Image (cartoon, rainbow, N blue to C red):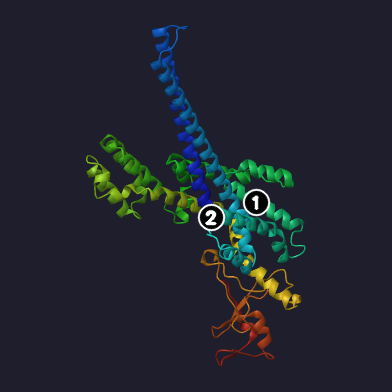
Amino acid sequence: MDQCVTVERELEKVLHKFSGYGQLCERGLEELIDYTGGLKHEILQSHGQDAELSGTLSLVLTQCCKRIKDTVQKLASDHKDIHSSVSRVGKAIDKPLLGFCAMLLISCSHANEFGHLATEAGTDPSTDATLWRLEVQDQDAGRNFDSDISSVGIDGCWQADSQRLLNEVMVEHFFRQGMLDVAEELCQESGLSVDPSQKEPFVELNRILEALKVRVLRPALEWAVSNREMLIAQNSSLEFKLHRLYFISLLMGGTTNQREALQYAKNFQPFALNHQKDIQVLMGSLVYLRQGIENSPYVHLLDANQWADICDIFTRDACALLGLSVESPLSVSFSAGCVALPALINIKAVIEQRQCTGVWNQKDELPIEVDLGKKCWYHSIFACPILRQQTTDNNPPMKLVCGHIISRDALNKMFNGSKLKCPYCPMEQSPGDAKQIFF
């Protein structure tokens, strides 16, 4: 994410420079044309076309030529600076792909070699020569990217069904991002057939999100009204917050919108029970229309962050109605892979070094536990306290009569004949009385 922000920042700088350079060129060239045209007209009027120029006019023409030369050099210098900015954008894009990901996926010792390169060379780490050597190392690491990944891959993991599933996930990701042409091209090249009705919801959602980003509420309000019953069923406040934002936009117009704001306030009636306080605040702000909301105790209503919040709320509720996750499965899987792969590469190297390669031969489990962070917690996990193993569909958690919970495998290993003694309390019970539980 930080790398994406860096690229966006550099791109904004380039676009700003392009705009400024265009205006500077136009203004500078127009001034030169007017100046030289006026000078030509003055010479023709005072001396004629074939008359010899006086010393004063010669000096004026010399200054004119110098001014033209300086202007051209200034424009060329600014143009060169724009090329440098474009180059920085390219480096900002290349660096995460060739540097950061490769550094993330290779061993820590290799990263330490990069860190000590400048010190060993006895040079300043910020100099161009040192940075160039670091970039060469980054490119070498990027060339080893495939070999590092293949070292922890499992043969046969990308069969026809798996490849088709990956293509479907990628197509859905492109639909989510509004990149419909890319998704259709991928479907065509991979031979994947996608029902047109599958992409229609994404087209509508992206259209509404694009409108919200430019602070146009009408499409989102129409969508919320048409889906009101389903939004109420999932206890969503989206429609009220959209009406609230529209009401605030009317307040920003001052007293000229006072009548329209009072008329629009009727839309708050269905939400009076659950949002009474918020509605009271909105109605109280009408008193300060004459002096301006920005100069009143209700200035917090103009907070710009609420527009970003409404985009997040709309995305969350719309995805919930469609039965989709808020985040793209492809982006979640990629983020999880970036966290897990360095640890897997290291453990793979340890296994090969100790010549115990047969330890890790299961396709459905990892050799070590990888902590992906709380943002990747989507459901509860139960580990059997007896066997120290995480329960699965084939080995679900079982609740004993006494209330203690163990896995089914532990239950099968512990009962003797027709009786089972709980490992945590003295109660004896029948194994058949245990019940499967669901988290």
Considering only vertical position in the picture, is 288 above or below 352? above
In the image, 265 versus 132, the foreground residue is 132
Mark 2 is on which residue type?
Thr
Considering only vertical position in the picture, is 150 above or below 353? above
Say which residue label 2 marks: 127
User: x and y percent of residue 72 in the render?
Assistant: 49, 29
Residue in view at x 45 percent, y 44 percent? 225
Considering only vertical position in the picture, is 12 above or below 411? above
Considering only vertical position in the picture, is 140 above or below 179? below
Task: Please rate how many residues cluster around mark 2, counting C-alpha atoms within 10 Å: few if below 14, some from 14 to 19, many from 20.
Answer: few
Residue in view at x 41 percent, y 11 percent? 43
Q: Is residue 119 left or right of residue 38?
A: right
User: x and y percent of residue 26 in the render?
Assistant: 46, 27
Q: Residue furthest front?
A: 55
Say which residue label 1 marks: 170
Comes first in the chain, label 2 or label 1: 2
Mark 1 is on which residue type?
Met
The part of the image, by quadrant, that contains residue 420 is bottom right
The kind of secondary structure element at disc 1 is helix
Q: Which mark is residue 345?
A: none
User: x and y percent of residue 340 in the render?
Assistant: 62, 66
Marks 2, 1: nearer the viewer: 2
